[in-house]
Image: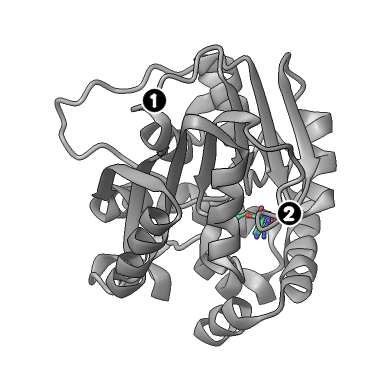
Amino acid sequence: MRKIVTYYLSASMSMKKILWRILHRAIINRYKGSELVFLNYGYEYLNPNDESLKLKEIDEKERYCLQLYHSTVADVELNNKDVLEVGCGRGGGASYIARYLKPKSYIGLDMSKEVIKFNNKYHKLPGLSFVTGNAQKLPFEDQSFDAIVNVESSRSYNDMNAFISEVHRVLRPNGYLLFTDIRTKEENELLRERFQRAGLKVIKEVNIIQNVVKALDLDSQRRYQLIKKKTPKIFHGFAEEFSSTKESKRYEEFADGTMIYIQYVLQKE
Ligand SMILES: C[S@@+](CC[C@H](N)C(=O)[O-])C[C@H]1O[C@@H](n2cnc3c(N)ncnc32)[C@H](O)[C@@H]1O
């Protein structure tokens, strides 16, 4: 799996597109929207006194994945705002934000046209739409959005500077980038510098790795079951690494501090 991740990170944009297409297609063929609308590691609150997020029954199943979105956007008012999400995957976060936080409009963008087709069929809500596009060349006019959401998608972008510069271009003055993803500590130093150099001011930066590990601990059983039920045995190892169940290498890297999970609130200056 380590080899696959290294290969994936250094692959060309078109190869990544093909790999995501294969993966999304496989997931679409196996899992209904009612079973799986998130593809992230999740987030759980550490303090037992933290008030639990009140969710509708239908959202409970993927609570931890949904909480990763909630914690990423919670510091900024999205009500009545124009919001773009880059790398929306199967649209669970987009649907959560559209239903609970009521932006004026919410566009979910992903490079995989398969997953966009799935989202447009499965998540039908007023003000919510999905488009195919590349994070490094956003198909929107300058200053179109009040906020941009980016959850666990950026690490593999071939040109992170291009993504950041596109974010700056399509944000309105004082607009926000609400960002979360995996990095090593060194990669995060570079990332912070890139944001600042591009004119995105750091309002908040927090390492949420303990929250992510706790979520994986609590969610591992559900992840195993999903894999066992629908994935051919030969792919179990890969599927377990992809979803970072407890015996996976990625889980180890999270637990031993090799990787951190960073969350930013950034504001266009
Ligand atoms: C790990 S998934 C996370 C999906 C979703 N944010 C979630 O938390 O459930 C990463 C997503 O980013 C998308 N992606 C990767 N590179 C991209 C790019 N250059 N432009 C747009 N989307 C991209 C992939 O197709 C995939 O759906």
Q: In what element is the residue under mark 2?
A: helix
Seen at 34% across and 44% down, the residue is: 201
Ligand 1 is within 8 Å of the C-beta of the residue at disc 1: no
Q: Amino acid at mark 1?
A: Val
Q: Which residue is mark 2?
A: 27
Left or right of residue 46, residue 130 in this image: right
Q: CA distance from mark 2 to mark 1?
A: 32 Å
Q: Quadrant of residue 209?
A: bottom left
Please provide percent x and percent y for residue 120. 81, 32
Query: Which quadrant does the N terminus fall into?
Result: bottom right
Query: Which quadrant does the C terminus fall into?
Result: top left
Q: Is residue 21 above or below residue 62?
A: below
Residue in the foreground of this view, choosing between 214 and 10? 10
Q: Quadrant of ligand 1?
A: bottom right
Q: Which residue is mark 1?
A: 76
Q: Residues within 10 Å of mark 1 (few under 14, many from 20)?
A: few
Residue in the foreground of this view, choosing between 17 and 217? 17
Left or right of residue 97, residue 247 in this image: left
Seen at 26% across and 37% down, the residue is: 45
Seen at 59% across and 57% down, the residue is: 163
Q: Which mark is residue 240?
A: none
Left or right of residue 129, residue 264 in this image: left
Q: Residues within 10 Å of mark 2 (few under 14, many from 20)?
A: some
